[in-house]
Image (cartoon, rainbow, N blue to C red):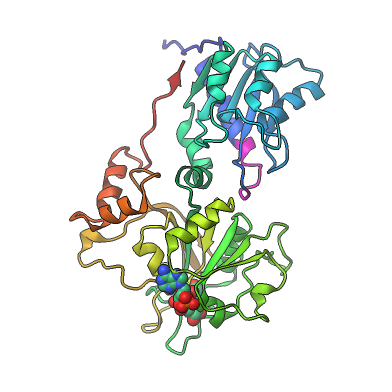
Amino acid sequence: MNQVPTAPDGLQAAGRERAMRRALALARLGPAHGPNPRVGCVLLDPDGRTVAEGYHRGAGTPHAEAAALADARSHGVDPRGTTAVVTLEPCAHHGRTGPCADALIEAGVVAVHVAVGDPNPVATGGATRLRDAGIPVSVGLLADDGEELLRPWLHAVRTGRPYVTLKLATSLDGRVAAVDGTSRWITGPQARAHAHTVRAQVDAIAVGSGTALVDDPSLTARRADGGLFEHQPLRVVLGRREVPDDARLRGPGGPLLQLPTHDLDAALRELGGREVRHVLVEGGPKLATALLAADLVDELHAYVAPVLLGAGATAVGDLGVTTIGEAARFATEDVTRLGDDVLLVARRLKPAEDMSVEDRSAAGRSAAGPSAAVQTAALSTQDGRPGRRAQEEI
Ligand SMILES: NC(=O)c1ccc[n+]([C@@H]2O[C@H](COP(=O)([O-])OP(=O)(O)OC[C@H]3O[C@@H](n4cnc5c(N)ncnc54)[C@H](OP(=O)(O)O)[C@@H]3O)[C@@H](O)[C@H]2O)c1
């Protein structure tokens, strides 16, 4: 019979994994929007039993580790001698709360298991601090799941630009409007309701000034009954033409920010500087095309209706692709039926999240085109996800 590997803290690998899965589930209870990452934490006693749990509920509230320690104490449990299983490396900085690494050291935990190291230059260093205090730390337990949970946040922290999700609502032949310009509604009520739930999970929604002027959208996140979700994303208009004073964009909803530029990298960095981690771009065709041509789209949400228009504006214009090898390829993450429509969620696979725009445009100009980057990443695992990294035990 195979022996189950035992960790330095005496816990069996299966127990640590189970605890990390629980920590990941706890993390998902936190808000998807906001400047801070979603983090979950579980405290295990020496027999591997869960004695406390916690997760981060958003900026200004306790971090997951502090919440788990408080949970233990509220039940009269002394956290001394426990093992902490945390989805993200405990922070080492004084923000709105104290450093979590210090809190764990003071509480007397004996080991820490982490899914993902913290790339945030402000907060990183928690693992080193814990190790310096004689507490063993492993980084990389269920790292792929941790990375997936934190994808927009990690991307934003690593690149300085928010994660860009491009929404397209099209006919089966890829059109967003009929010849006379009418476009309401190509997709059905279920697809539109779904799009509103996505709006409620992002930090910002962006459109080009063309859409702002022609459609006069409100860009609010609304429930099926028309009421506003509690969280309203920042509303961003890209372009030089001004949004009129009486535009719906100036009505109830998130704050309005106009960025009068066509430099999309600079615009995204401006949003990154405002702690926007995830932006949902909702068109129109000119902005979508420019973002795709600059390879700045990280994820596609394509709502496709079984409707044929035959003519009219297409969702995406000329990307400079002249041969199939240059196609901008995405990997399908999910397909959902919404009434008569279908939602395809696909992710751009990039070799390195921290590549500069210059590097990426150069890669796009190479003979193999953008698909080379996609193929490199896809080959690393059979399931098409980035390669599973070895767990680092120290
Ligand atoms: N069915 C759908 O899903 C959907 C979604 C959205 C829109 N639409 C339709 O699309 C139509 C509007 O089309 P559109 O293409 O004009 O809208 P757009 O892409 O929203 O706006 C175009 C404007 O974006 C600004 N912009 C900022 N950066 C740019 C860049 N790098 N390159 C080019 N433009 C940049 C420019 O504004 P300035 O000229 O002011 O500088 C440009 O004129 C409307 O009829 C609307 O109904 C359909």
Is residue 186 visible in the rendered image? The answer is no
Q: Is residue 156 above or below residue 113?
A: below
* Residue 31 lies in the magenta stretch: yes
Q: Quadrant of residue 50?
A: top right
In this view, the residue in front, 258 or 281, is: 258
Is residue 91 visible in the rendered image? The answer is yes
- Where is residue 230? Give x, y as percent: 73, 57
In this view, the residue in front, 37 or 31, is: 37
- Where is residue 4? Give x, y as percent: 47, 13
Q: Is residue 102 above or below residue 142?
A: above
Task: Give me the residue at 36% from left, 35% from top.
Answer: 387
- Where is residue 214? Give x, y as percent: 54, 82
Q: Which secondary structure is most common in the magenta stretch?
A: loop
- Where is residue 133? Give x, y as percent: 59, 13
Q: Is residue 30 above or below residue 92?
A: below
The furthest residue to the left: 367
Task: Give me the residue at 48% from left, 48% from top.
Answer: 160
Q: Quadrant of residue 66?
A: top right
In this view, the residue in front, 94 or 113, is: 94
* Residue 83 lies in the magenta stretch: no
Task: Give me the residue at 71% from left, 33% from top.
Answer: 97
111 relative position to 370: left or right: right
Q: Which residues are magenta?
A: 25-34
In this view, the residue in front, 295 or 28, is: 295
Q: Quadrant of the N terminus?
A: top left
Q: How many marks?
A: 0
127 relative position to 27: left or right: left
Q: Is residue 26 above or below residue 78?
A: below
